[in-house]
Amino acid sequence: MSSAWSKFASPSTFYPLAGRMIPVFWVLAAGSLLVGLYWGFFETPDQLGGSNAQKGYYRIIFLHVGAAWMSMWLYAVMVGWAAVGLVFNTRLSYMMANAIAPTGAIFTFLALWSGSFWGRPSWGTYWDWDPRLTSELILFFLYIGYIALHSAIDDARRADRAAALLAIVGLVMVPVIFWSINCPDPNQCAALHQRSGLGKVDGNILFAMLMTTLGFWMYSFATTLMRVRTIILTREAQTTWAAETIQAEARS
Amino acid sequence: MNEGLMHFLSQGGYAQFVWGAYGMALLLLVGEVIGLRRGRRTILARLSRLLRLGTPPDHPRDHE
């Protein structure tokens, strides 16, 4: 068990493995996104009635929910790798955390951006200091802070540890975002974010939403692995295997 | 243009919101992949040049 783990924790073993996995994740991402977007735009009603009436703009949901879920999930995964790095002092764990951060920041920004484009027609405003919007914005700054702190420290190992600690402290924002709803009962007040069970969502909308989310997840695997491969080569360049790989790949 | 396409593009009169949201997603996600590919080529070129020159490519960041 421990020998298998340490084998894959070695950058020289992981580098070619990641290279083989990237195309698989691209195919899965493209397939899920195509199915999800087709379903979302063509197999769902043009507007929603009921207590929370929504016109055509509700279709932003297929982007918004997936991006928001990925923003929180990627942060949790990034913290997981950072914590493994701190506990076991494994180089590759820190590299994984570094590789996740930019993709996480992009999905956090997309959740905020798509939310404001939904909020304008639905709420009448692009932005409000609503608890969930505010806490999601703080999550965006945490990603930016992690990236900035890491690049501000010259020594890579110290940068790894300092940024890991910042990420771990920031993890408190993820449950805050999840539970930050200022209107638990839609009969009492109007709010865009309500406590909603997925079971109440129309089956076609739910399917499309889950497919685009799956697509974003597979996309995140692909970009994270692409990024970590470049990080591995940069940081392992003194080793023989990395030097040989660099020269072979620079020629091709 | 045919009616079905017009109907799709207009998104019930909310085209600027729907396409504004999806357009940004397309821009950032495609941009990220292009950036990753370019960055990789740049770094590979720099590292291989350093290796050819016989300079150990230890970036200042990698000193302990």
Image (cartoon, grey):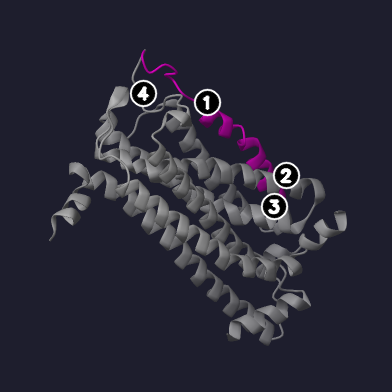
Q: Identify the residue shown where x is 27% and y is 28%.
A: A49
**Amino acid at pointer 1:** Trp
Between marks 3 and 2 in the image, the one whose residue lies nearer the viewer: 2
The location of residue A146, given as percent across then percent down, is 59, 47
The Cα–Cα distance between marks 4 and 2, rounded to whole angstroms, is 36 Å
First along the sequence among labels 3 and 2: 2
- Report the disc number at residue A191: 4
**Amino acid at pointer 3:** Asp
**Quadrant in the picture for the N terminus of chain A:** bottom right
- Local crowd size for mark 2, using a 10 Å CA cut-off: few (<14), some (14–19), many (≥20): many
- Local crowd size for mark 1, using a 10 Å CA cut-off: few (<14), some (14–19), many (≥20): few
Residue marked by disc 2: A83
First along the sequence among labels 2 and 1: 2
Which quadrant of the structure image shows residue A61?
A: top left
The location of residue A150, given as percent across then percent down, is 62, 52
Q: Which residues are magenta?
A: A159-187
Residue marked by disc 1: A179
The Cα–Cα distance between marks 1 and 3, rounded to whole angstroms, is 30 Å
**Amino acid at pointer 2:** Ala
Image mark 3: chain: A
Element carrying mark 3: helix
- Report the disc number at residue A160: 3
Q: Identify the residue shown where x is 43% and y is 55%.
A: A33
First along the sequence among labels 1 and 4: 1
The location of residue B6, given as percent across then percent down, is 16, 54
- The magenta stretch spans residue B31: no
